[in-house]
Amino acid sequence: CLMCHGDPETFSSELKESLAVHYPKDKATGYEMGDFRGALTIEWKKANE
């Protein structure tokens, strides 16, 4: 995760270029190990209920 969402100062020039092309408005960088950006929960009923 941190390869693309970590400290942008550590990104290779190739990665920076690719992120700019594919995700020009993305601001999801600067995260560190242990940070959360979001979470999902899923619930469903068992088939026999």
Image: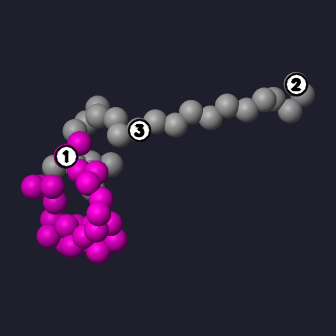
Which of the marked residues, 2 or 3, is nearer the chain's N terminus?
A: 3
| Circle 1 SS class | loop
Residue at point 62% right, 35% down?
A: 42
Residue type at mark 2: give it.
Glu
At horizontal 29% and vertical 63% (from top left) the residue drawn is 25
Image side of residue 29 versus residue 8, left or right = right
The C terminus lies in which quarter of the figure?
top right
The residue that label 3 is drawn on is 38
Whole-percent x, y for residue 17 in the image: 21, 73
Residue 44, image quadrant: top right
Task: Identify residue type, mark 1.
Answer: Gly
The percent position of residue 16, horizontal first and vertical second, equals 19, 67
Q: Is residue 46 above or below residue 7?
A: above
Badge 1 crowding class, 10 Å Cα cut-off, few under 14, some 14 to 19, many 20 or more, is few
The tag on residue 3 is: none
Between residues 48 and 24, which one lies in front from this camera angle?
Answer: 24
Q: Classify 10 Å Cα crowding around label 2: few (below 14), some (14-19), many (20 and above).
A: few
Kind of residue indicated by mark 3: Gly
Q: What SS does tag 2 mark?
A: loop
Q: Residue at x 19, y 46 (%)?
A: 30
Vertical comparison of 23 with 21: above or below: above
> Which disc number belongs to residue 30?
1
Please give the residue where the numbered disc 2 appears in the rendered image. 49
| Mark closer to the chain start, 2 or 1 | 1
Density class for disc 3 (Cα within 10 Å; few <14, some 14-19, many ≥20) is: few
Percent coordinates x, y for residue 9 in the rendering: 9, 55
Q: Is residue 32 left or right of residue 42?
A: left
Q: In this picture, which residue range is highlighted in magenta?
A: 8-31
